[in-house]
Amino acid sequence: MKISFHGACQEVTGSCILIETNNTKFLVDCGMFQGEEEYKKNFEPFSFDPKTIDFLLLTHAHIDHCGRLPYLVKQGFRGKIFCTPPTADLTELMLLDSAKIFLSEQNKTAQEPLYYDYDIEEVKKLFVPFPYEQEKVVCPGIKIIMRDAGHILGSAIFEVLINDNGVNKKIVFSGDLGNSPSPLLRNTEFIKGGDVVFIESTYGGETHAPREQGRQELKNIIQEIIFKKSNLIIPIFAMERVQELLYELKLIFEQNDFSEIPVFCDSPLAVKTTEIYQRYGQTYFNEFLRKKIKTGEDPFHFPGLKITANLKQSFRMDKVKPPKIILAGGGMISGGRIMTHLDKYITDPKNILLLVSYQAEGTYGREILDGAKKIKIDKKTIPVRSKIAGIFSFSSHADEPHLENWISQIKQPRPYQVFINHGEKENSLALSVALEENIGIKNIIPIFQKEYIF
């Protein structure tokens, strides 16, 4: 069996793993590279022939895991794409949004878009959605089972049972693991055993603050903008982060009577993804939230929340006097509606820019988080004068204690090899050392496109 990595090696974007047996080739994810320099990789040819890939396992709908699927299909891939039903629906939305971004960038760069919206129709034909816990034969000698990763709606851990030349092997792909317990989703499932395990390391070497602490910090920030009569700007991802944040704001507003403060959700994509969350809630949400929904409660709505469905409404909210809160699409400040708000709000020292999501290297969000006093977007320089705050206890990624605990539960059999991917170099290395020293697990931090034989 040959294993090679075609993204997310000592970085957190571009997830794509190729597994080759004597009879079969399959991929786990086919994600987009993000960050100013890494972005160029999206337009490079695949280092394998997409026509020869038999099928693909899609762990979840974040763009760094699904974003190059249309390009893969354009290059000849015609295999089935296995995932959960919510992942299929959310991926379609994410890819359509990505196609719009490629088209808008064509006007600036004159570069041919990686794909168009009609290419996504070809991807949709290949989806084979099925639920967690169901065993499915995907080709002779290979069976798969999906478990709940607890990361975003429909996110999956894949157990792959392979008969390779008469030898049975169990391979486990973590995908992105959740920061359980989540206020929305069920807890990340543990896996009983596995021979070879692939694990993400986004927050290797780091420990999240308790979620309750994050709630208190968010409440304090809201009280600060009330006192200052200023604005709170929060860049958000359209999946999971915005739904969790709306739920957290709902709780804070109800407990503290902040109903007079307008909250603008400035992300048309977030509106559409929230509709999918509501559609699948009774199946995929945790038990506590399912019970609340049965009583008629909407977990994503509260007095003061305003949805800006179009650009006219987006521009109009700038005229609303502070204090106000703006949730704007573009969690890493690398695209989305947040870009239109930067020079309006982060140049004012009274305002607060709150980062609640992982900021990858090469993004404007990372520059700001690292203390940049100005950022240059295209040919425009924008001074960063607003207060910068970060609350990462709302993260949908497991921290190192969660990752280590998850691996430690895999016992029957205990993995003889672990691959650590989807993490920047220092995070992957920190997790590698922890697994070796604390659990005695052999592990490899893979090199981009290098082949590993087992």
Image (cartoon, rainbow, N blue to C red):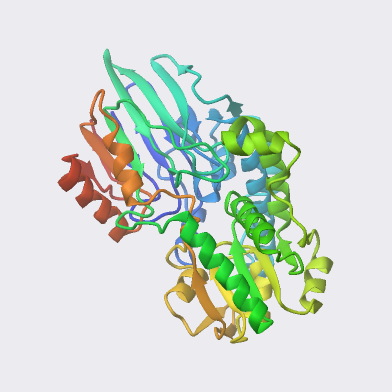
Query: How many numbered discs, if any?
Result: 0
319 vs 14, nearest the viewer? 319
Q: Position of residue 195 (x, y in %)?
A: 26, 27
Residue 283 in the figure: left or right of residue 26: right
Residue sitting at 48 percent across and 34 percent down? 156
Residue 253 in the figure: left or right of residue 410: right
Q: Position of residue 14 (x, y in %)?
A: 45, 50
Residue sitting at 54 percent across and 83 percent down? 384
Residue sitting at 68 percent across and 49 percent down? 116
Q: Is residue 333 visible?
A: no
Q: Position of residue 44 (x, y in %)?
A: 47, 53
430 vs 333, nearest the viewer? 430
Q: Position of residue 38 (x, y in %)?
A: 45, 61
Residue 341 in the figure: left or right of residue 26: right
Residue 37 in the figure: left or right of residue 404: right
Name the image quarter holding residue 298.
Answer: top right
Name the image quarter holding residue 450.
Answer: top left
340 lies above or below 290: below
- Quarter of the figure with the C terminus: top left
284 lies above or below 365: above
- Quarter of the figure with the N terminus: top left
Q: Is residue 429 visible?
A: yes
Residue sitting at 32 percent across and 54 percent down? 204
